[in-house]
Image (cartoon, rainbow, N blue to C red):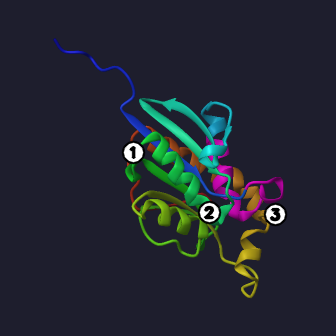
Amino acid sequence: MQYATVGLNKTLLIVGLGNPGEEYASTRHNVGFMCIDEFARKNSFDPWMNKKDLKCELTQATLGDTRVFLCKPQTFMNLSGEGVQAVMHFYKLNNTQLVVVHDELDINFGQLRMRVGGGPAGNNGIKSVSQHVGEDYGRVRIGIGPKKPEQMDTADFVLQDFSQTEREALPALLREVNALLSEYAYGSPVTAETRSFL
């Protein structure tokens, strides 16, 4: 006798990078948090839960036949990998099931670039994730460059709020990332591509 298997055949973990705390909420470095907060709102995810043992805030929903977890590490950016590794270990996930959404200074504001693998490009959150789980995971890289003024310290720039012009474009950015993450949730693989939203 054969038993029919009923249930989910896919699990996806989407991680947004950022720093916890109200003072960082609207900074460039927190655009990863902003994007997955918006994705959670648009797709009726469960309320966020603070999972101290996993060093993150976590929520989940089922989209199509995929169980999707959203994760916001609560360790501050430079230790983001600790929370990502803890969640992956707890749910027995591998890197093909991981997508990280983060800011990237080397890409101009108005562009998103997707790929699997690669170096951290100066983002300490990505550096930490790669140190903990390896480099071969999907990435949604959100341009926040170029740095203005050029002589400004990079850390100061990424921890600034978006400019007025950039803030006006954020709804378009969030819509584009929401569409992209929906594609991944419904089964599209992460492939190397660039999208513009301006």
Residue sitting at x 53%, y 39%? 69
Location of mark 1 (residue): 188
Q: Main secondary structure of the magenta part?
A: helix
Q: Residues within 10 Å of mark 1 (few under 14, many from 20)?
A: few
Identify the residue at image location x=65%, y=73%. 145
- Looking at the rendered structure, the kind of residue marked 3 is Gln
Q: What stretch of residues is rendered in magenta?
A: 20-39
| Residue 88: x %, y % from top left | 47, 47
Viewer-nearest residue: 141 or 127: 127
Total marks placed: 3
User: At numbered mark 3, what does the secondary structure look like: helix, strand or loop?
Assistant: helix
Q: Is residue 172 visible?
A: no
Circles 3 and 1, Cβ within 8 Å, touching? The answer is no
Check disc 2 and report the residue beneath it: 79
C-alpha span from label 3 to label 1: 34 Å
**Three-letter amino acid code at the position of disc 2:** Leu
Residue lying at the far left of the rendered structure: 1
Which mark lies nearer to you, 3 or 1?
1
Q: Is residue 27 above or below residue 92?
A: below
Q: Are marks 2 and 1 in contact (CB under 8 Å)?
A: no
Task: Examine the image and state in which quarter residue 3 appears.
Answer: top left
Q: Secondary structure at mark 2?
A: helix
Residue designated by label 3? 164
